[in-house]
Amino acid sequence: MSKTMTAIVFGGSRGIGRACVQVLAADGFGVGYTSVSGAPVSGTSEGTVRCYQADIREMADVRKVFEFTRRDFAGHIQCVVANAGINVPPAPLADFDPERFRQLVEANIVGAFNVLAEAARQVADGGSIIALSTSLVRRAAPGLGPYSATKAAVESLVRAMACELSARGVRVNAVAPGPVDTDLFRAGKSPEALARSAAMSPLGRVGRPEEIAQVVGFLASERASWVQGQVVQPNGGMV
């Protein structure tokens, strides 16, 4: 295995994360990715892609992923993608279950903090760190305030890190999609709800995971050498 071009995708077993693994591997990265279950992504080469079981809420797990990736790919880590997170059923704030909010905070804020903090310590000079957020941070939607709030926190971490790591040439950005057609997105939604999501874009559809992953691949590459501290919104014109 080459000692260059190594990436880690936290939360890479399905949906957008899986597409990110595939795009980065196609772009020449050796990719370590995480899954809560440890189940491997299909259609990828064992030589260039490795799966690690990890719970991002536990800093010890996050650190082990960096350790194992360095061991298995024998090189510096050039790119880290912080994609792992959860959502819960939406509800108005007055009716939102406090335990579900705590779950969101633990996974989406504490988990993202763990990944981003370790990435700041371990990513190579000149590398790239990319966090997944949501366009809902900038477009209010009833029932989604708690989820959007956790992603707004991630964006705040990204902006601060961009200032902190610029001296090392490390680029830190966020990708904030609109609705994307994944199993998680479809879960529990009626056909009418899916149609409303599609109508949020003037293009009349939701995004595809690979469309988001291509933006991540761009930010991971030297083509994005002048992109720093930004929140890129691939959302089909959802403004």
Image (cartoon, grey):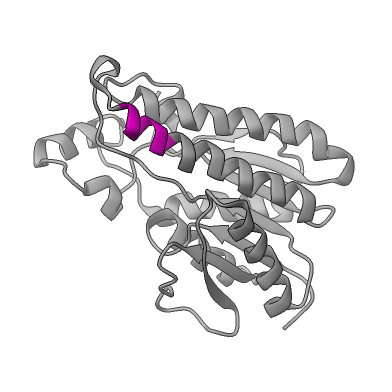
Question: Which residue occupies the foreground of this view, 36 or 232?
Answer: 36
Seen in the image, is 42 located left or right of residue 156? left
Tell me if residue 155 is in the magenta stretch. Answer: no
In the rendered image, the residue lying farthest to the right is 167
Residue visible at 49% across and 54% down in the picture:
213
Rendering quarter of residue 160: top right
Q: Residue furthest top?
A: 94
How far across and down, in percent of the image, does residue 30 sit? Answer: 64, 73
How many numbered marks, from 0 up?
Answer: 0
Instruction: Name the residue at 33% across, 34% down.
Output: 100
**Residue 154, position as x, y percentages in the image:** 56, 34
Residue 112 in view (yes/no): yes
Residue at left offset 28%, top offset 27%: 97
Q: In this view, does 45 lie above or below 222?
A: below
Give the residue drawn at x 45%, y 46%: 85
Image location (x, y in percent) of residue 102: 41, 33
By secondary structure, the bulk of the magenta-drawn segment is best described as helix
Res. 238 in view: no
Along the viewing direction, whichever of 200 and 12 lies nearer the viewer: 12
x, y percent for residue 45: 52, 83
Name the residue at the left extreme.
191
Q: In the rendered image, which quarter contains the N terminus?
A: bottom right
Figure check: 33 above or below 234:
below
Q: Give the range drawn in magenta.
A: 98-104
From the viewer's perspective, tell me whether residue 174 is left or right of residue 151: right
Q: Quadrant of the C terminus?
A: top left
Residue 203 image-quadrant placement = top left
